[in-house]
Image (cartoon, grey):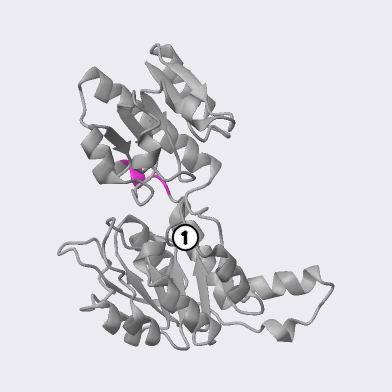
Amino acid sequence: MQVGLLEPDRFDPSAIARLRQVGHVVVPFDGSNLTEFLQPVQVLFTRLAYPIDGAFLAQAPALRYLCSPTTGHAHMDEDALAQRGIRVVSLRGEQSFLETIRATPEHTFGLILALLRRYRGAFSHVDAGGWNRDLFRGEELYGQKVGIVGLGRVGFRVASYCEAFGAQVSYFDTEKEVKAAPGWPRLTGVQQLIEANRIIVLCASYTNGAAPVFGREQIAAMRGRYLVNTARGELVDEGALLKAIEADALEGVAIDVLSQETGAHQLERWNAAAAGRNIVVTPHIGGATFTAMAKTENFIVGKLEKILDGTENAT
């Protein structure tokens, strides 16, 4: 069975060794000819750089398993995969394992502090030779009101970090039963959460094709507030958000995700909007630590081994 590594850069060596031990031929993509690379591949490991759609799959006639060490599937056309009978092997639903991965909540918390302390502007100021702290007088997290949209694995950790720093936490979640601390009130909707808090953090999951959680009404209510999104760009009406940023309506925005990230994204507009404003954009690095990526790659290899042995089903 031939295994292709579509994004092989720093793929964990121990995960590759495990694949080779069970007799799989591991082929890394060298970036030269995608069609030639995909033709014989039966198992494909991918991250987030490529849209896995019908046109992509047409180049991979032998593909049987798509392995993606991610919880979200926004980069995949799940209908096209299902029509081809290709099984997806991902981290979706692997809650026990994911509890050991803290990269995304830590990054999310860092972005909250970056906005409150205006790090982007301060870094650029010093890089240009400046040394005027009064231009970047910020705020403390202590005493702030923080609203979490989606109190799942990431949301719970972010809420815990914020509470440890003395912030008041509340949340909204569509799930009936969630893990929450006793002092975190559950609000009835996103609009109410915005009205009750100054910092809003998007940690919700996203289903392909779903409407944004943050539409025009919610963005209009964010005037003078901070927004952090490390979940999925599609959770937000991105055009409306960019208009609000360009009108200086929000106190600060930090994102680690773009809408249509592997397609016709608006990074150029984001960069233009960020100039001179309290805007932080990072390139989807929430889960990108050496520790997290090595652990997730090995976990997916182990899950694939069990699937091939017939001892576990893919999700």
Whether 283 is drawn above or below 140: the answer is above
Q: Is residue 230 left or right of residue 63?
A: right
**Residue 290, magenta (yes or no):** no
Whether residue 68 is visible here, answered yes or no, is no
Predominant SS along the magenta part: loop
Viewer-closest of 202 and 275: 275
Q: In this figure, which residue is indicated by the disc labeled 1?
A: 257
Report the residue at 65% width, 84% height from top.
Answer: 137
Magenta segment, which residues?
97-101
Q: Which percent across, then down, holds residue 63?
A: 34, 27
Q: Amino acid at mark 1?
A: Val
Q: Which percent across, then down, holds residue 44?
A: 40, 29
The residue positioned farthest toward the right in the image shown: 129
Quadrant of res 171: bottom left
Whether 112 is drawn above or below 303: the answer is below
Viewer-closest of 127 and 109: 127
Report the residue at 46% width, 70% height from top.
Answer: 228
Within 10 Å of disc 1 (Cα), the crowding (few <14, some 14-19, many 20+) is many
Whether 156 is drawn above or below 23: the answer is below
Quadrant of res 221: bottom left
For numbered disc 1, what is the local secondary structure? loop
Q: Which percent across, then down, holds residue 289?
A: 53, 45
**Residue 98, magenta (yes or no):** yes
